Image (tube, helix red, strand yellow):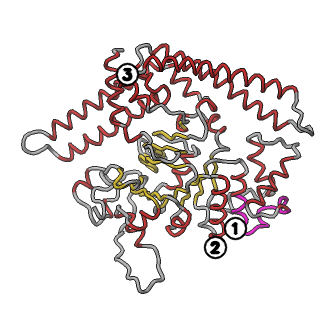
Amino acid sequence: METKSAVAAVARLADSMDSYLPKADDKRVLLKIRNLKQYFPVRGKKGLFVKANDGISMDIYEGETFGLVGESGCGKSTLGRTLLQLNKQTYGKTMYYGRTLDELAPEYALNTAKNLTSNLTRLIELDAKSEKLAAQIAKMQNSQGDCGDKPELFKLMEEHSEERKLAENAFLDLAQLVGGLLISPDLSSVSAAYLSLYETAQERSLAADKLQRLNASDTKNGSKKSAAIVELEKRIAAIEETAMRKHGDIDKLRAAMKGNPEYEKIEAFRDDGIDLSRLKYSEMRRLRRDMQLIFQDPYSSLNPRMTVGQIIGEGLLAHGFFTRVSEKMQDYIMNIMEICGLASYMIHRYPHQFSGGQRQRIGIARSLALQPRFIVCDEAVSALDVSIQSQILNLLSELKEEQNLTYMFISHDLSVIRYISDRIGVMYLGNLVELADVDDIFRQPLHPYTDALLKAIPTTDIDKPRSELILEGDIPSPITPPMGCKFHTRCRYVTDICKQLAPEFEEATKGHYVACHHKLGA
C-alpha cells in the first residue's frame, strides 16, 4: 500500500467529517447515532424492503429525556428497539458511552486491530470511488449552457452521497479505534500493539464476569470473602497492571507521531465508545442491564403466571445480580417496588390483581431493578387514563433526577412529549425531519410537517383562532418511498427540487436541526 495515498484519503475524509466531532460546549453524550438504517425484508418479494428507519443521525445526552414524535407507522418504536439492538440494525453506527472498550473488549475491536492494513486498503478504494463520482457531478454542473439533465444529476448526487457514507463509516471504524496512528508508517506495529491490548482486555472482561457470578452465589453471612473470590481479585489486579503496560506501549507509538499536522487531525476521531451495531449477540446481552425498555401495554407485557417479585427478579437472576438462594434478593426487590410507588406487601401478587397504572409501575420497576443508564419508554402512558398518565410521567421524571437516567420517550401525543421532554425529534416515514429543544419546536417549527402536527393539537381556547389544517393525504409506503423529500407528496410548499433531491439534515440555528429545502421562517 502506498503511504502517500493512504494519508491523502484518510486526511480528506477527516476534513469532510468535522461535524461528527463533539463541540467544546457539548453536554456528555450517552448515545451517538449516525446514519442508522433498519430495513425489513418483505416476505415473498425478493429485493423489496420495508425501510422503517432510513438514515437517522442524532445524539442523546446523558440525563436528558429525548422525546420522539410522529404519526403511527413512521418508525418511532422501531428506532427505540434498534438502539437497544433488539432489532439488529441494517447499517450505520450507534456509539454507546456508558462503558469503555476496555471494559467490554468486543470481538470487533480485536478483528479491527488484526486486519488494520486490509481495512485501510478498502477505505482507500471507497474514497477513490466517492471522489470519482464527485468529479462527475462537478463536470456536469460546470458544463457550458444547461447544467445537464436534472434527474440524472440528482441521481448521481444520491449515489455519491451513499458512497461517501460508506467511506466515512469505514474511516470511523478505524479512526475511532486507533486515531492518528492510522497513518503511521509502521502500521504492522500499531496493529500488533492494539491486538495485544484487546486480548488482555478480553481476558480481564471474562474474569470480571466470573467474579460477579461468584459474588452473587456467595451466600455466607458476614463480610469475609471466600478464597475463590480473593484469588480472582488478585488475578484481575495483575491483568490490569499488564493492560496499563500495553497502553504505555501504544502511548509511545503516539509520541513518535507528535508534530505531524495530519496525525493530530485524525487523532481527534479516536473514541472509547462501544459501537453497538458491531457487537455479537452475547456481547450485547452483557449490556442489556444498561439499556432497558418500558413497554406500551401494561397488560400483555407482564407474564400472568408470575408474581410481581418473580417478574422484577427475572432480570436480576439472568444478569447475575443474585442467585435463587440469595436472601438479599427479596429485600432488594421490595425496595425497588417502594421506589416505584408499589407497596412491598404486594410482592407475591399476580398482574391481574393490579390496576393499569399499577401494572405500568411494575414494568418500570422491572426495568429500574437492573440499574440501567438508558431506558426506552415506548408509548409508556398511551394505554392509561389521563389521570394515571400524569402520575406515571411524574414518577419517571422523579426517577430520572434521582438516578441520573436517560430516556427516549416515544409518543404520538405532543402534549405528553412537551410535558416530559428536554428535546424533541420529529419523525416522518423513517427519517428525522426536525430536532430541537422542546421550547424551540413549539415556538418556531421549521419543517412543514412539524408545523402541521402542532396545528392539529386540540385546544379549548375559543378566543384563539385555529389555523387551517395543512396536512392532507396518507403516509406513502415505506417499501417504495417517494424520490427526493419523502414529505413532498403532502407538503403545500413543494417545488421541483423537493421531488428530486432529499434535503440534508442540517443545523439551521444553534441546536435546531431540520431537513427541508424550504424551511419555515427562513
Categorize mark 2 by other alpha carbons within 10 Å: few (<14), some (14-19), many (20+): few
Dot label at residue 357: 1
Amino acid residing under circle 2 = Asp
Looking at the image, residue 326 lies above or below residue 296: above
Res. 141 image quadrant: top left
515 in the magenta segment: no
Q: Residue furthest left?
A: 145
Give the SS element for disc 1: helix
Which quarter of the rendered picture does the C terminus lie within? bottom left
Q: Image check: 346 left or right of 483?
A: right
Q: Is residue 386 visible to the viewer in this orientation of the structure?
A: yes
Residue under circle 3?
260
Q: Image check: 162 left or right of 134?
A: right
Residue 156 image point, x, y percent: 25, 40
Relative to the observer, which residue lies in front, 87 or 454?
Answer: 454
Per the model, the C-alpha gap separating discs 1 and 3 is 61 Å
Residue at 47 percent across and 13 percent down: it is: 188
Relative to the observer, which residue lies in front, 461 or 510?
Answer: 510
Amino acid residing under circle 1 = Gly
Q: Is residue 50 visible to the viewer in this orientation of the structure?
A: no
Q: Residue furthest bottom?
A: 463
Looking at the image, residue 227 lies above or below residue 522: above
Residue 505 image point, x, y percent: 36, 50
**Dominant secondary structure (helix, strand or loop) of the stretch shown in magenta:** helix
Give the SS element for disc 3: loop
Categorize mark 1 by other alpha carbons within 10 Å: few (<14), some (14-19), many (20+): some
Residue extent of the magenta highlight: 345-363
Dot label at residue 385: 2
Residue at 51 percent across and 66 percent down: it is: 418
Amino acid residing under circle 3 = Asn
